[in-house]
Amino acid sequence: MKTVRNLVYGNWLPAVVDDDKAVFSINPTTGEPVAKFHPASEKMVNDAVAAARRAFNKWRLTPAPHRGEILYKAAELLVARKQELGELVTTEMGKVIKEGLSDVQEAIDMAYYMAGEGRRLQGETVPSELKNKDAKSVREPIGVFGLITPWNFPVAIPSWKIFAALITGNTVVLKPSSDTVACAQVFVQILEHAGVPKGVLNMVVGGGSTVGDWLVRHPGIDGVSFTGSCDVGFGVERLAAAGRKVISTEMGGKNAVIVDNEADVEWAAQGCVWGAFGTAGQRCTAASRIVVLPKVYDQFVEKFVELMKNLQVGDPFTKDVGPVINQAAKDKILNYVGIGLEETATNRKMDIIVNSNMDEVLYRKGTFVPPVIFTGVNPQSPLAQEEIFGPVPVVIRAKNLDHAIDIVNDVEYGLSSAIFTNNVNASARAERDLNTGLVYINAATIGAEIQLPFGGIKATGIGAREAGGRGGALDLYTKWKVVYRDWSGKIQKAQMDE
């Protein structure tokens, strides 16, 4: 079992030494502890912020290409330790091993991408309206960032935030999820070995209502990037606004796939199985609603159910679907299944189909939820409106494409949506009218690439998006400075001089 500590100015420190106060991250497959830690005290959070503040000036003055060289080194170390770290992701978080390895690969991709930004970080140079004068804009770092990350992508999401923050010259205090602290510690240690200087990257562990709250409130924090639930994220937004901090939140989704009358049904069913049951449905972009047009409804449901029933549930190192993260998550998901059963009892159009390919012994040890499909669901049902965050998609019948688009848009979230169709006009209408930050055509609602911005609208979040591209993370972690230089030798008055 690993012991996880807090990193403050290059020192890995325990919060307390009393083992009675230890907290454990648990292997959701077996119920056994993976790591123990002692939550950081408020003083330790203060020390971590002070360390980041102390390191900021030297780091911001380090040339960006040199900062990039450190990230390139981090990428190489991640490549060398990909198997080890991927297996730890599967052990501590429970996603199947192919996804555990892809979690690390995403961090590798992000490291290489953001390292390259060290030789770009473009501003803009424009002509002046006056003689012997030039004008430009440049990016500058904001300061110290508090980064709060979730358990479902315990390496990838910290990499999105940390690499973007560091390449732009900011310093960081990371607070990872308590459910995946071992993954966070190994990842941060790799960055240390890559050459990130003391104080530039710090880490504190503990609960969101204590350690996370202290971090967001702290007057030494200039910006906050949060990924997690809406319940917590709305509070983070309020606290950050009260402190006049830069803020970005990426929260929930109730993502939908439209299966058009002219879709390839086999292709659509495969995409929906991947979108709905990948990571046991524990992605903010998971395909939670499948909106199907009449011509292909019965054919699609038959194929979707067939493919779902073929999934093997169990040990994430050998099976198709692993456990959910913890007992609280399992209880929440099963509560929604109960709501669905009550609706099925009174709605003759509804049906429930359950995957039974489950090892009973392992089921009793771990926090497994077998894949479940509800068909014939009312678009206004809680099953179709609220984020379940588990392997429980619903199938909804739509009258036509306009009706399907209305159903997709009629939720409080706006993260990801998709359409399967061979009709170019239908795809164009969906691209234009689906009110989400991400739109996929003939693909599942999951699978974003790091070179474009990631995020959504409405209750899904606010602020600059994650990852790369215009509107991505570089806009979160930098502020603009406009510089005018006049070498005319006299005072020129813009808009007044001829």
Image (cartoon, helix red, strand yellow):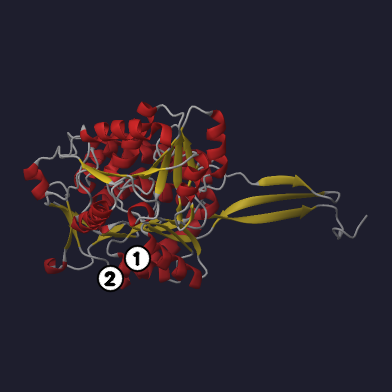
The residue that label 1 is drawn on is: 212
Q: Residues within 10 Å of mark 1 (few under 14, many from 20)?
A: many
Nearer to me, 385 or 8: 385
Q: Describe the element under mark 2 as helix, strand or loop.
A: loop
| Amino acid at circle 1 | Gly
Nearer to me, 174 or 46: 174
Residue 376 rendering spot, x and y as whole percentages: 33, 45
Nearer to me, 58 or 136: 136
130 sits left or right of 336 in the view: right
Residue 120 in sight: no
95 sits left or right of 494 in the view: left
How far apart are the two marked residues, 2 and 1, measured between alpha carbons?
11 Å
| Amino acid at circle 2 | Ser
Q: Is residue 305 above or below residue 205?
A: above
Q: Residues within 10 Å of mark 2 (few under 14, many from 20)?
A: some
Residue 362 rendering spot, x and y as whole percentages: 9, 44
13 sits left or right of 116 in the view: left
Residue 75 in sight: yes
Residue extending farthest right:
498
Q: Nearer the viewer, mark 2 or mark 1?
A: 1
- Residue 41 is labelled as 2
Residue 346 rendering spot, x and y as whole percentages: 26, 54
Which part of the image, by quadrant, shows the C terminus?
A: bottom right
- Residue 472 is labelled as none
